[in-house]
Image: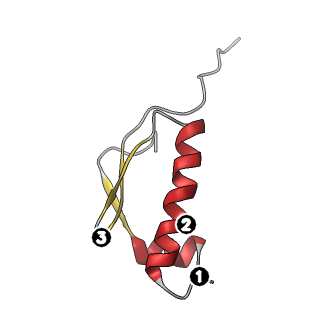
Amino acid sequence: MSYLRKPCLVPWEALQIQFGADYGRLRDFKRKFLAYIADVLQAYPAARLSEQPLGLLLRPSPTHLPRSRRV
């Protein structure tokens, strides 16, 4: 998300194909996926994302890793 330059809406259907093709119903996938996103936000609290009716809205966010110093 640190490479995003503008907000990006990822449709629920595309997320289901990528991460939950074994779910028969989109609403079942969405419920489970959002639970996992809550876990992700524990590790990456600076992530700027939000649930939208049509998908997951990703916004430019700072990197979750500190910058390394060059020697």
Note whether 57 is above or below 28 in the view shown. above
Q: Find numbered disc 2 in the image and state the secondary structure of the residue it sits on.
A: helix
Q: Nearer the viewer, residue 42 or 7?
A: 42
What residue do we see at 49% from left, 59% from top?
34
**Which of the marked residues, 2 or 1, is nearer the chain's N terminus?**
1
Q: Name the residue under label 2.
A: 32
Q: Is residue 13 or residue 8 the one in the foreground?
A: 13
Residue at mark 3: 54
Q: Nearer the viewer, mark 2 or mark 1?
A: 2
Q: Residue sitting at 28 percent across and 68 percent down?
A: 53
Where does the image place residue 8, in percent across and percent down from the top left? 33, 56
Viewer-proximal residue among 6 and 26? 26
Going from N to C along the chain, the mark reached first, 3 or 1, is: 1
Q: Residue, x 52% and y 74% (percent of image)?
A: 29
Amino acid found under the numbered disc labelled 1 = Ala
Residue 21: assigned label: 1
Q: Where is residue 68 in the image (x, y as percent from the top left)?
A: 65, 20
Secondary element under disc 1, as helix, strand or loop, is loop
Q: In this view, does 10 lie to the left or right of 45?
A: left
Disc 2/disc 3 C-alpha distance (Å): 16 Å
Name the amino acid type tagged 3.
Answer: Leu
* Distance Cα–Cα, label 3 vs label 1: 18 Å
SS assignment at label 3: loop
Specify which label sits upstream in the sequence, 2 or 3. 2
